[in-house]
Amino acid sequence: MPRAGGVARGRAEGEARGRAVALVQLLTLKVGPLPQATLDTVHAATTDQLENWTARVLTAKTLDELLS
């Protein structure tokens, strides 16, 4: 039987992966194909970073501005 901590950690990791996938989709629609370095940065980000970047995706003019 899974422990509560393991289940919570799994949920958090799944949420972060989902946020990363959604952000990549939005960025790709906005600026076109993303460099591998950007994909690596997004997929290595914390949930807080992903939330901040997703909030700025509509207002940032460049990838650098968004990911700063």
Image: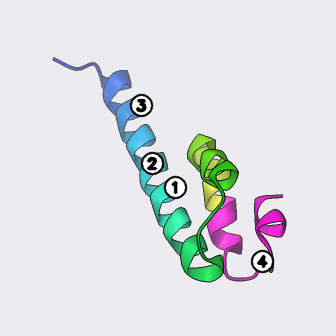
**Mark whose residue sits in front, 4 or 3:** 4
Q: Secondary structure at mark 4?
A: loop
Answer with left or right where residue 58 lies relative to residue 25.
Answer: right
- Whether label 2 touches label 1, CB < 8 Å: yes
Observer-nearest residue: 31 or 15?
A: 31
Q: Secondary structure at mark 3?
A: helix
Which mark is on residue 17?
A: 2
Name the residue located 49 percent from the left edge and 47 percent from the top edge: 16
* Residue type at the position of mark 2: Arg
Q: CA distance from mark 2 to mark 4?
A: 22 Å
Residue linked to disc 4: 60
Task: Say above or below: 7 vs 19.
Answer: above
Q: Position of residue 51 (x, y in %)?
A: 62, 59
Which mark is on residue 20?
A: 1
**Mark whose residue sits in front, 1 or 3:** 1
* Residue type at the position of mark 4: Ala
Name the residue located 60 percent from the left edge and 72 percent from the top edge: 27
